[in-house]
Amino acid sequence: MQSPVMLITGASRGIGAALARLAAGRGYAVAINYLSNQSAAQAVADEISAAGGQAMLVQGDVAQESDILRMFAAVDAHWGRLDVLVNNAGILEQMMPVVDMSAERIARVMNINVVGLMLCCREAVKRMAKSQGGLGGAIVNISSVAAKLGSPFEYVDYAASKGAVDSITLGLAKEMALEGVRVNGVRPGLIYTDIHASGGEPGRVDRLAVNVPMQRGGQPEEIAEAVLWLASDAASYVTGTWLDVSGGR
Ligand code: NAP
């Protein structure tokens, strides 16, 4: 039997890379999307292959609709099926209060984190929904606890983008409830990845860990475990909801 196929956006580093490794170990054929860090993406794919798993690379910018269409077409051509989409690619920008934010910056964050994610959802639904001739599937959207906290003086634009992701998850889950497609989200807390350096503070997780009830940051694999559960048949009656994986924050 052919392995189920999982497409993960932004899987060259951080949470996406950890998920790709774990998913491959649990029997998924994994399509690893990345933006520009080809060597990091290749390293993840090589590790999966060396462990006996299946991986392919799909370069593409989720802010570009043409790239998204090309990514999904590449997965169609290579494996001919899509069972799980994990919308993980996301960015944040330099920490600053709203009063200093440019229109260009806000648009960049929204384009990648919201518009790109929604277009990837659309392409997945075209392939998964029963009314479209699909066999069903699951979508997991990576949001953030920032959607609940608002990220004041850091990146309210990013928090707002994740609020939008949560609304997309809820609305699409309801649209897909009779289509065999479950749509859920994971809201990570403070996780050790490179993303904090792009906000200007690589050590942000350690600085803020004291505010987390568990008093520590999380590892990317702890997010990946939640995604894999939501994607699996073990979550067959779960749709339109979220798992906060945030140490109680
Ligand atoms: P990361 O370490 O910065 O990795 C980002 C990944 O996204 C990389 O693989 C990168 O590819 C890719 N990417 C960036 N822009 C892209 C684009 N336009 N198109 C396609 N891929 C793109 O990030 P992370 O911390 O693992 O975050 C993953 C997700 O978790 C994001 O949605 C983030 O908002 C969310 N999250 C993270 C935390 C946290 O504390 N880390 C907390 C809450 C939520 P390249 O390697 O090619 O650049």
Image: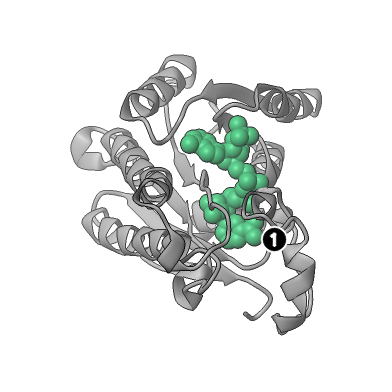
Quadrant the N terminus occupies: top right
Dividing the image into 4 quarters, which one contains the C terminus? bottom right
Task: Single out the residue that lies furthest toward the left.
Answer: 131
Q: Is residue 154 above or below residue 8?
A: below
Q: Is residue 110 left or right of 6 when viewed as pictured?
A: left
What residue is at 36 percent from the left and 30 percent from the top? 64
- Residue 206, given in percent of the width and then of the height, sits at 79, 68
Instruction: Judge: label 1 CB < 8 Å from ligand 1.
Output: yes
With respect to residue 10, does 92 lie above or below?
Answer: below
Q: Position of residue 155 (x, y in %)?
A: 50, 63
Q: Amino acid at mark 1?
A: Ile
Residue 178 visible in this rendered orientation of the protein: yes
Taking 100 as reference, is 50 left or right?
Answer: right
- Please name the residue shown 62% across and 55% down the image: 199
Q: Identify the residue position indicated by label 1 in the image.
A: 191
Whole-percent x and y of residue 130? 24, 41
Please tell me which residue is depicted at 65% across the width and 39% down the height of the picture: 20
